[in-house]
Amino acid sequence: MEHANMSAWILVPLMSFAILFMILTARKKQLFIRRIQGLSAIDEAIGRATEMGRPMLCCIGLGGLDVPTFQALAITSYIIKSSARFNTRAIVPVYDPQIYPVVEEAVRESYVAEGRPEQYNPDDVRFLSNRQFAFAAATAGIVYREKVAASFLFGVFYAEALIFAEVGQQVGAIQVAGTPSTTQIPFFIAACDYVIIGDEFYAASAYLSREPTLLGSMVGQDIAKGMLIALIVFGATLATFAPILGKSFGSLFLPK
Amino acid sequence: MPVKAVVGPNIGMILLGLVLSLVALGILMLVPQRFRRGIVRAATLIGGLYAALEFFLPTQPMPTPDDPKAIGNFLSPSVVPFGNYVNAVFGWTVGLGVINLCQVHGKRLMKGGAGSFNSVVFFLSMIMMTVIGILQKAHPNPLNKNLYDVLFVGGLVSLDATMFSIVAFYIVSAAYRAFRIRSVEATLLLATAIIVMLGQIAIGQLLTRWIPMTSAFHSLHIELIRSWILTIPNSAVTRAIAFGLGIGGLAVALRIWLGLERGSYFDA
């Protein structure tokens, strides 16, 4: 079991304070966030699927009940709400049976929120398999058979990421992807039309919903990032100049 | 005796998990709809508080038979039982997944048509794997073991490996598209990829072997350039992305923990 060290003791509360402070600030004043092209492309992809009269694939990855999967689900909910307005079908394959009831509920609620509960089809939220490549094969099969017009790949992915992206590319789907799995980002960049990188993945729900709480959290994230950058510059400067002063980096912080 | 020691507490935990889950579900069903989210939020807050306190509270040596160097605090001993409880809940949800699969394929089978053959294969595979899996555990004779190996190692593992091997071909086609020179970035990507690939293989390393290692230009050895690309710019970018993701994850976790998350299933 891991426990907090000195850095975690200082940084985690400090960053948490910055994020919570900005959430409270955002409730009082309007905050600005820059345009994220990958997220703006979501509406374009939904529009394309609507025009072509073909379904969309919303894959939330291989994560379980964890933060990245909840974030992926928040993005998927937005996509389904938008597509419900145009009567466009969304297929959501599920890898982990733990999250299957949560996904089912979130998808159903998204249709209800748009006033289209009749559009919800329980067969479109499908548990496929909790074996990585069986899930990949089944999802690829859905993409081929249904000839999806848009493919949204948000969540935790591993080696199967490229299978989804390449199969989507082969059927001519417009693809938008975002993942916290840093090893899979290059594959998505190579094979997808739009990719959101790094913390843009966690900014997605704020960007799409413009909800003040989420916007505040996003600006808080930027402040926390600023703190880290300042700390890195400070550390790099000390590490560079400490040898010139004839001391090691660590000895600058130790009592004589 | 050792088997009993391992199996006993796990079965107890699974049963306790099932009972607790049933009680929790029963209470949630009895509570009026408008209070349910409040209860779920309170449970999330308590669960998150436990995890946060366990992580942040000062630690002391707490050796266990498995790990004599273990450290922890007074909350640490409960981490494993909580983990077992989560496993028990997972056992429930596997059943939900199987029910969903049977529903989808059952409907398709009833309708008939083009995809119904796949559904027949699904039901046959599931029934065979379940029956032979149970037989192999209950009566581990050579026949049952061999049948299980044929299905699991010969069938499932081979199919998994086949799917994985397809990735190699997809990498080639994705790389071909990514490396086409269409912009400055794509050109840069192509040049970097060529250097890394040549630096990785012996024939590539031969190209710059003529540069003496003692000369001022020895750092132009292709394997050294490759190593520099991977350890300096590549690591810097990967760490930058990881920092951003870490902070983003912290923000979402805080919002969920404190009931501040908004959108679909989080709204009050």
Image (cartoon, coloured by chain):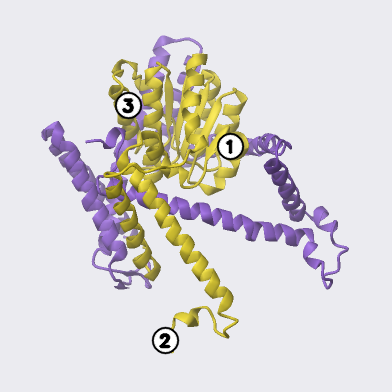
Q: Is residue A198 above or below residue B128?
A: below
Q: Which residue is mark 2?
A: A255
In the image, the chain rendered in yellow is: A
Mark 1 belongs to chain: A
Q: Position of residue B27 (x, y in %)?
A: 13, 38
Residue B214, by quadrant, is bottom right
Circle 2: residue type = Pro
Q: Position of residue B17 (x, y in %)?
A: 23, 46
Query: Gap in Å between the C-alphas at discs 1 and 3?
Result: 29 Å
Crowd rating for badge 3 (residues with CA inside 10 Å; few <14, some 14–19, many 20+): many
Circle 3: residue type = Ser
Disc on the earlier residue, 2 or 3: 3
Can residue B61 be seen in the rendering of this structure? no
Q: In terms of secondary structure, where does tag 1 sit?
A: helix
Circle 1: residue type = Leu
Q: Nearer the viewer, mark 2 or mark 1?
A: 2
Crowd rating for badge 2 (residues with CA inside 10 Å; few <14, some 14–19, many 20+): few
Q: In terms of secondary structure, where does tag 3 sit?
A: helix
Residue farthest along the bottom direction in this orientation: A256
Q: Which residue is mark 1?
A: A162
Q: Position of residue A191 (x, y in %)?
A: 61, 35
Q: Looking at the figure, which quarter contains the N terminus of chain B?
A: bottom left
* Residue depicted at x 48% and y 60%: A229
* Residue depicted at x 40% and y 32%: A76
